[in-house]
Amino acid sequence: MKSRTWLVIPAVAALLSAACQSAQTQPVQRPQVVAVPQEEVPQPTVSGYPAQGDTTPPMQAPAPEPGTGSKRLSYNSCNVEGPYVALTFDDGPHATLTPKLLDILKEKGVKATFFVLGQCVNANPEVLQRAAAEGHEIGNHSWDHKSFSKGGGAGVAAQVNQANAAIEAAIGKKPTIVRPPYGATNATITKRLNEEFGMKVIMWDVDPLDWKVRNAAHVKEEIVKRAKPGSIILSHDIHPTTVAAMAETIDALKEKGFQFVTVSELLAMDRPLTAAATPTSPPAVAPAPVTR
Ligand SMILES: [Zn+2]
C-alpha cells in the first residue's frame, strides 16, 4: 500500500498544482478541466485523481448533534434565532473564479467562508489575501484533498498542518475551522481535529451538488429550496456554473429574508436544542454514493 501511495502522489500533485495554477504563470491553460478533480471521483476526463484504490464512497456527513451547544465538535447546521445562513465555498482559491466570486460577494455585501486547499493557497496567495481582507472567513480543507479517513494519524496531521501553514503564511492567521475532504471523518478524527488542532469540524446541511450538476439555475434552485435558518450551504468556487449562480442565489435568499454570516459567526449564535425546539424534520444529509 505504501509504495502505491507514493506512486500516485506525483500525479495528484501535478493535477492539483495545475488546478491551482495562478493566472500570472499560466495565462493560457485555464483550469476548465483540471480545476474540477477534487470533488468528482468518477470524472472520466480527470485521470489520476483521486488516487487509485481511493474510490470507496466516503462517509456521509454525520447527523447533527443537537443539545450540546458550544461543546459540539462538528456542525452540519446551527440552531439560531434569526434568519442566518453561512455560504461556504470549497477547493479554492482559484486564480480566476474566486476573484469573480469575491466581486459578487462584495457587490452584494455578503460575507462567506472559504475552505481552501493548502496547495491552492500556495499557488494563489493573493486571492486568499483578498478574501481575508474583504472580511471572509478562511477554513482548512486539507493540503491536497486527500481523505482524512484514509491517511492514518500522521496523514491527517500532515494534511492539516501543511494547509494551516500555507494559510498562515498567506494571511497571517491560522484557521479555527476545518472541513474534511469529501466530508470523510469519523468520531476519532473529529475529536482529534478538535483536541489536537483546536479546530471545529464543519460539514453542511445544504448541498446543491454543484460539482455534479454544472448548471447555474439548478445550483440556485437547490440552495434556495433547501436553505433554512442556521444552514451551512456547501458549494465550490472552482466551477464556473457555481460562480455564475451566486448573484441570483444571494438575491433570492435575501428575498426570502435570509442574512449571511461567516461560519464562525453562525457557530457563535448556536444554541443547544431543547426537546421543544427540536426540528420536526432533520436537515438534509448528503446522499450516500457521491463524494465532495
Ligand atoms: Zn472539497
Image: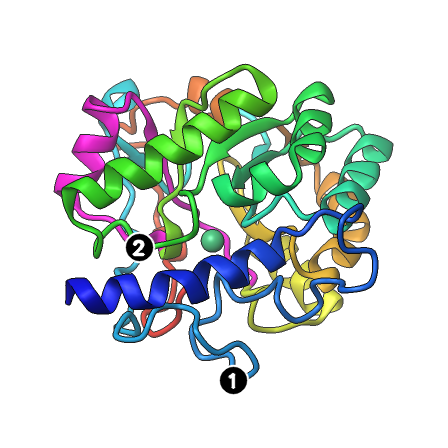
Extreme bottom residue here? 44
Q: Position of residue 167 (x, y in %)?
A: 51, 28
Q: How many marks?
A: 2
Residue 147: image tag: 2
Q: Is 117 above or below relative to 40?
A: above
Q: Is 180 in front, or is 246?
A: 180
For this view, does 84 lie left or right of residue 240?
left
Quarter of the picture containing the C terminus is bottom left
For this view, does 280 lie left or right of residue 151?
right
Q: Residue at x 56, y 61 (%)?
A: 208
| Residue 155, image quadrant | top left
Q: Which portion, as a residue range, is magenta?
A: 183-208
Q: Position of residue 108 (x, y in %)?
A: 82, 34
In the image, is residue 196 part of the stretch drawn in magenta? yes
Residue 111: image tag: none
Residue under circle 1?
A: 44
Residues at marks 1 and 2, CA–CA distance in whole angstroms: 20 Å
Q: Is 68 above or below relative to 13?
A: above
| Residue 241, image quadrant | bottom right
Q: Is 291 in front, or is 150?
A: 150
Q: Residue at x 55, y 15 (%)?
A: 172
| Residue 61 seen in render | yes
Amino acid on which the number 1 mark rests in the picture: Pro
For this view, does 38 lie left or right of residue 286?
right
Q: Position of residue 33 (x, y in %)?
A: 65, 71
Amino acid on which the number 2 mark rests in the picture: Ser
Disc 2, SS: loop
